[in-house]
């Protein structure tokens, strides 16, 4: 990496999936526009290699980030572009988040060939999702639905829907919009029905801790609103000891000059769903307070049962 304000060569570490590469290319375009030379290094992660098991059953800490962090630590890449929801809430020692980008729609999308919304699905309809968070909230409003695991990249998931293996599937709307694959989106599910995952829709740019030069070069990518909202959501997730495969939802947004946080903890079968709604000024404090309240109201028992059933492993996913 050169210094003295001259254009810099930056190497981005990224997973090889279509969406991950879209994200890495998106950041590289913004960096090139500032005169930097950019290379993208594809790194295969544990999560990419295990495709036949529901994510919640694996529970490997940082399964979409570990190998990329190893490349960062070894100096093979200068920055990593992640879906923020895949980044553990506590980064391993030696790394920091240099920027959180402007957020795409954080809500979930209901995709189907025949039905316009969740409520229109027939009794016992087969719905695909590998997320306990989505499953729990679907079951809370439609206990009759037949929920089945759904793995693979976005194209694979959409193909399975097209082939009729599912009546509907639930995916993050951000990924579908980024890839321009919106034709099967029938409904953007309101956050009060399907609370999104912490950090969903935002990208986290990770660097080596203390790499001041790279941090300064990436500062323009940081969106203060996205950082405040996702810091709040990730604080809630952290206070509940949960990772992205635990049935926890968190959605923060600026409202009337305050930060408003909606959060849920739910039993995977939808039988219990705790909801918290509050406002505050300090993102981290707001997330921690909501987490403490949910634990006190029975969230601890729900999460203990989830971990006890081996559905998710307590540290990070």
Image (spheres, grey):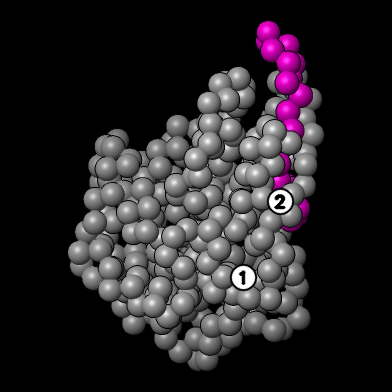
Residue 224 falls left or right of residue 62: left
> Is 121 situated above or below 238?
below
Q: Which residue is mark 1?
A: 111
Q: Is residue 256 visible?
A: no
Quarter holding residue 265: bottom left
Query: Mark number for residue 125?
Result: none
Residue 158: percent from the left, percent from the top? 71, 70
What number is the disc on residue 15? Answer: 2
Q: Which residues are magenta?
A: 1-22
Q: Residue at x 28, y 37 (%)?
A: 282
Percent of width and height locating residue 255 = 32, 42
- The answer for how far apart the CA atoms under marks 2 and 1 are is 25 Å
Note whether residue 30 is visible.
yes
Local crowd size for mark 1, using a 10 Å CA cut-off: few (<14), some (14–19), many (≥20): many
Residue 162 position (above or below residue 102): below
214 or 112: nearer the viewer: 214
Residue 3 location, quadrant: top right
110 relative to 254 in the view: left or right: right
Between disc 2 and disc 1, the foreground one is: 2
**Which residue is at the front of the view, 35 or 240?**
240
* Residue at x 24%, y 56% (from the top left corner): 292
| Labelled pair 2, 1 in contact (Cβ < 8 Å) | no
Q: Looking at the image, tell me whether mark 2 or mark 1 is earlier in sequence order.
A: 2
Query: Within 10 angstroms of label 2, few (less than 14), some, or many (20 or more) residues?
Result: many
């Amino acid at each position: 990496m050169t210094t003295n304000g001259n254009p810099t060569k930056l190497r981005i570490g990224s997973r090889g999936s279509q969406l991950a590469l879209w994200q890495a290319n998106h950041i590289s375009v913004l960096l090139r526009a500032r005169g930097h030379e950019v290379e993208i290094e594809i790194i295969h992660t544990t999560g990419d290699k295990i495709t036949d098991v529901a994510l919640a059953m694996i529970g490997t800490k940082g399964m979409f980030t570990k190998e990329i962090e190893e490349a960062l630590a070894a100096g093979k890449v200068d920055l990593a572009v992640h879906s923020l929801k895949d980044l553990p809430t506590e980064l391993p020692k030696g790394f920091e988040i240099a920027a959180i980008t402007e957020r795409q729609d954080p809500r979930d999308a209901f995709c189907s060939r025949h039905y316009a919304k969740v409520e229109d699905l027939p009794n016992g309809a087969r719905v695909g999702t590998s997320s306990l968070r989505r499953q729990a909230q679907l079951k809370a409003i439609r206990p009759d639905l037949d929920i089945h695991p759904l793995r693979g990249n976005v194209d694979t998931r959409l193909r399975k829907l097209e082939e009729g293996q599912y009546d509907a599937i639930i995916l993050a709307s951000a990924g579908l919009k980024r890839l321009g694959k919106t034709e099967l989106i029938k409904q953007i599910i309101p956050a009060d029905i399907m609370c999104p995952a912490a950090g969903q829709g935002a990208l986290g740019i990770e660097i080596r801790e203390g790499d001041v030069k790279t941090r300064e070069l990436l500062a323009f990518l940081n969106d203060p609103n996205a950082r405040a909202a996702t810091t709040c959501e990730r604080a809630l997730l952290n206070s509940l000891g949960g990772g992205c495969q635990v049935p926890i939802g968190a959605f923060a947004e600026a409202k009337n000059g305050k930060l408003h946080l909606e959060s849920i903890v739910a039993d995977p079968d939808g039988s219990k769903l705790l909801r918290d709604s509050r406002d505050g000024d300090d993102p981290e404090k707001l997330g921690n307070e909501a987490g403490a309240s949910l634990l006190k109201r029975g969230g601890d028992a729900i999460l203990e049962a989830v971990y006890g059933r081996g559905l998710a492993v307590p540290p990070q996913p």
